[in-house]
Image (cartoon, rainbow, N blue to C red):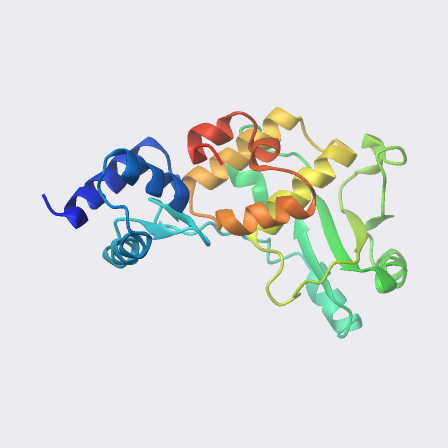
Amino acid sequence: MTQKKSLFRLLQQLSDERPYISFVQIKEACGADQIIENHDTLKGYLREAVKLGILHDAGKGWYTRLKKTAKLELDRSNPLPDLLKKRFPLLPFYHWSTQQVNPWMHHLLGKFVDFVFVDAEGAEDLAEYIRDHTEWNVILNPTAKSASTSSFREMTVVVRSIRREFDPETEPTVETLLVDLFTENNRLQLMDLAEFQQMALNLITSAAIDVARLQRRLGDRKKTLTDLLGNEATRHLGSF
């Protein structure tokens, strides 16, 4: 059997074991089975494997057997994003809602909380505008101490000021939302941690995400994939 055929058979075996595999895991498995030792040769065959659909790209250094890319749909009847874009055309912000993760929840969320992440200098003006011109219940930068479950009634929006650079044309990605929601859930107790982790696992195992991007986002918060997904992270992504 040729090197290429041996590698492709190995890739099939690895992807049968878990939905995501890293280049490091593939390289280690190739070394253990004495299939390919040359780094560049392995890279070239992996590019071919992706072209053939044996694996699919899951971010730098990661591959997946999942063909469908994860997408988070937003209720088109939600007027908030367009309202803010019209009023603050030059202010960088992005918006998401807990409603977007409902398809992956075991117990469906009964009420939703919207989040607007906005450049810190414009946060107060944006929050005041929403409060004065809409029926939304606005909470600006709530902390674990200041927040209470009674604050999060229907049509609640949390405005969170941030100082990191982001592109409002591409944010939020699926990976951004997962990390943001994980962080906000730790602060605001929107759902049980076990419920969150099960939702995240349901999402990433039903459609492909960019694992490398997710790791970078987590790294910015000094968190890991295990923090996000619990002990099940190893089963679905291997050791990392």
Vertical arrangement, residue 97 with respect to residue 110, above or below: below
**235 relative to 149 in the view: left or right:** left
Q: Residue at x 25, y 54 (%)?
A: 45
Note whether residue 134 is visible.
yes
Count numbered badges in the picture. Answer: 0
Vertical arrangement, residue 193 with respect to residue 53, above or below: above
Picture coordinates of residue 128, whole percent (x, y): 90, 59
Give 37 or 48, whichever is nearer the viewer.
Answer: 37
Q: Quadrant of residue 145?
A: top right
Is the N terminus in the top left, top right, bottom left or bottom right quadrant?
Answer: top left
Picture coordinates of residue 87, whole percent (x, y): 79, 71
Picture coordinates of residue 223, whole percent (x, y): 65, 38
Vertical arrangement, residue 169 with respect to residue 15, above or below: below
Q: Residue at x 73, y 33 (%)?
A: 186
Give 176 or 6, whichever is nearer the viewer.
Answer: 6
Q: Residue at x 72, y 33 (%)?
A: 190
Q: Quadrant of residue 188?
A: top right
Give 113 or 53, whichever is nearer the viewer.
Answer: 53
Picture coordinates of residue 9, whole percent (x, y): 19, 40
Note whether residue 72 is visible.
no
